[in-house]
Image (spheres, rainbow, N blue to C red):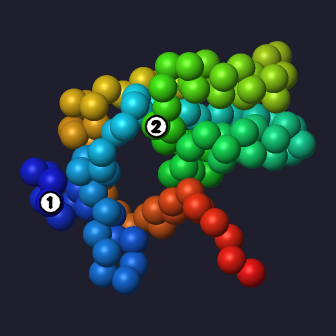
């Protein structure tokens, strides 16, 4: 449990609490957000982000990536936008700072699918 009490834990259903401050960061955590004007570019940018991270809000992703992976991701993402109309931002969050994450409310916390079974 986080030192921030129950307000720092997401209720993800099935009585399974999720506390982001307790999640291990394997490489470096990046918080990536975008504001994209055209629906086609928006879909393409979302797909790139889904390939590299986990969606936490409609246009916000958490990505646990090495420097090399992040550089490739950032280049791929920039290829999808129009720099005259769209905006991208990425915040690098170190391991010690992740432990200070504050959260509140109910959120669906999706994880990347390892395999789909039909």
- How crowded is the residue under tag 1: few (<14 C-alpha within 10 Å), some, or many (20+)? few
Residue placed most toward the observer, 101 or 36: 101
Q: Residue 42 placed where, x, y %?
A: 79, 41
Residue placed most toward the observer, 77 or 25: 25
Classify the position of the C terminus by image quarter.
bottom right
Q: Residue 86 placed where, x, y %?
A: 76, 26
Q: Is residue 95 above or below residue 59?
A: above
Q: Is residue 54 left or right of residue 9?
A: right
Q: Residue at x 72, y 39 (%)?
A: 48
The residue that label 1 is drawn on is: 1
Q: Residue 103 placed where, x, y %?
A: 30, 52
Q: Residue at x 10, y 51 (%)?
A: 3
Between marks 2 and 1, how big is the CA–CA gap? 21 Å
| Element type at mark 1 | loop
Mark 2 or mark 1, earlier in chain: 1
Q: Is residue 78 visible?
A: yes
Q: Are marks 2 and 1 in contact (CB under 8 Å)?
A: no
| Element type at mark 2 | strand
Q: Residue at x 81, y 23 (%)?
A: 79
Q: Is residue 26 above or below residue 86?
A: below
Q: Is residue 102 visible?
A: no
Q: Is residue 22 left or right of residue 5?
A: right
Classify the position of the N terminus by image quarter.
bottom left
Residue placed most toward the observer, 114 or 86: 114
Q: Is residue 30 left or right of residue 86?
A: left
Q: How many marks?
A: 2
Q: Residue 100 placed where, x, y %?
A: 21, 38
The residue that label 2 is drawn on is: 64
């Amino acid at each position: 449990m986080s030192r921030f009490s129950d307000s720092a834990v997401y209720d993800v259903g099935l009585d399974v609490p999720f506390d982001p401050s307790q999640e291990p960061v394997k490489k470096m955590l990046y918080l990536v957000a975008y504001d994209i004007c055209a629906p086609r570019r928006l879909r393409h940018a979302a797909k790139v982000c889904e390939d590299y991270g986990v969606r936490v809000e409609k246009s916000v992703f958490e990505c646990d990536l090495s420097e090399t992976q992040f550089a490739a991701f950032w280049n791929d993402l920039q290829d999808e936008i129009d720099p005259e109309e769209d905006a991208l931002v990425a915040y690098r969050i170190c391991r010690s700072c992740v432990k200070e994450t504050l959260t509140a409310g109910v959120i669906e916390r999706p994880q990347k699918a390892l395999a789909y079974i039909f």
